[in-house]
Each structure stands twice: as C-alpha cells, then as structure tokens.
Amino acid sequence: MRVQDVMSQKSRVVHTISVQRTAEDAIVKMTEQRTSALIVMDGETPVGIFTERDVLRCHVAWRDRLFREMPLSEAMTEKLIVARPDDLASSAMAMMIKADIRHLPVVEDQQIACMLTISDLVKHHVGELTAELHYLQEYITDLHDAVQD
C-alpha cells in the first residue's frame, strides 16, 4: 500500500495561512475550518506547520503573551516533514511515529497535495488487515470443506 492509496480516500483540501499572520489568526482559522493543522505559507512556499500542539506549546512557553501578539513565524513548527504519493504507507506511518507528529503533508509536483493524519493511515491499515483476515478465514473454511469431502 502506498500513500497515494490513502490519499484517494481523503479530501485534497489543504488549509493554509500566511506566515505574516498571528497565532490567534491561525487558531481562529483552525476553528472555522474544523482542522487541527495549517500549512504556513510565505507566498507560494510552505515554511512550516501550525498545529493544536503548537497552541499548547506556545501557551506554556509564553504565558504572559497574548496569541494576537504572537507572530505565527514564532509560534509555528518550522521543520516540515513530508511524504510523497509513491512512499509506502507503512514508511509514512513509521516516519510519523518516529518524529512524534500527527500531521503529514504529501508533496506532489512540488506542491502540497494533501494533508494526512496518523488516524488516516491507521484506519487504512486496519481496513487492509480486516480484508486480509476475511480472505484467510475464507481460505481456512475452504480447506476445512476440502478435508471433509
């Protein structure tokens, strides 16, 4: 299974925000869009990601600062870990677990084509395991029937 297989079952909407905005702007947009992460853009270039985890980190790190006074460039996570559509989904999942992240942008043709979550990958993997289990059960039933004949 490849990342593109998971992408095919997911909306391709990628929520973005300008790096010139504030952390409060990002929180409001995340709430309005019902998303847990935004790609932070400088023009057409992705420069980071802002997630619910960043909200908590910033709140603890800068207790005396208001989110509306906090530039997104200071609040975001700059290191953007990405996958490609032809990557193995298991490799993408392993990369997310190792980096302790929950959101994985997928880059296709030098653009962010999709944002996957760890939940997307786990659900897809469980679906595949369930199908495999079903096939194995049928195989065992067929073997049992063949022995009975």
Image (spheres, helix red, strand yellow):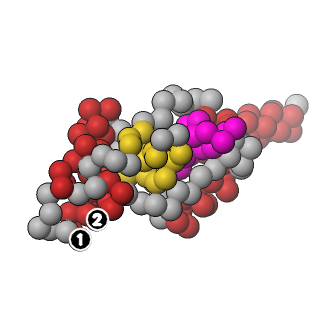
133 sits to left or right of 101: right
**Residue range corresponding to the magenta coloring:** 104-122
Q: Front-most of 113 and 100?
A: 113
- Dot 2 alpha-carbon crowd within 10 angstroms: few under 14, some 14 to 19, many 20 or more: some
- Residue 9 lies, with reference to residue 53, above or below; the image says above
The image quarter in which residue 30 lies: top left
Residue placed under numbered mark 1 in the picture: 61
63 sits to left or right of 40: left
Proximity of marks 2 and 1: CB atoms separated by less than 8 Å: yes
- Residue 55 lies, with reference to residue 115, above or below; the image says below
Residue type at mark 1: give it. Ala
Across and down, in percent, residue 147 comes to 86, 39
Residue type at mark 2: give it. Arg
Q: Say the numbered circle drawn on residue 57.
A: 2
Residue at 32% in and 54% down:
72
Q: Which quarter of the figure is the C terminus placed in?
A: top right
Across and down, in percent, residue 138 comes to 74, 34
Across and down, in percent, residue 132 comes to 70, 41
Across and down, in percent, residue 19 comes to 38, 49
Q: Is residue 129 visible?
A: no
**What predominant SS class does the magenta segment belong to?**
strand
Find out whether residue 119 is within the magenta segment: yes
24 sits to left or right of 79: left
Q: Say the numbered circle drawn on residue 137.
A: none
Residue at 26% in and 49% down:
22
Dot 1 lies on which element?
helix
Q: Front-most of 83 and 77?
A: 77
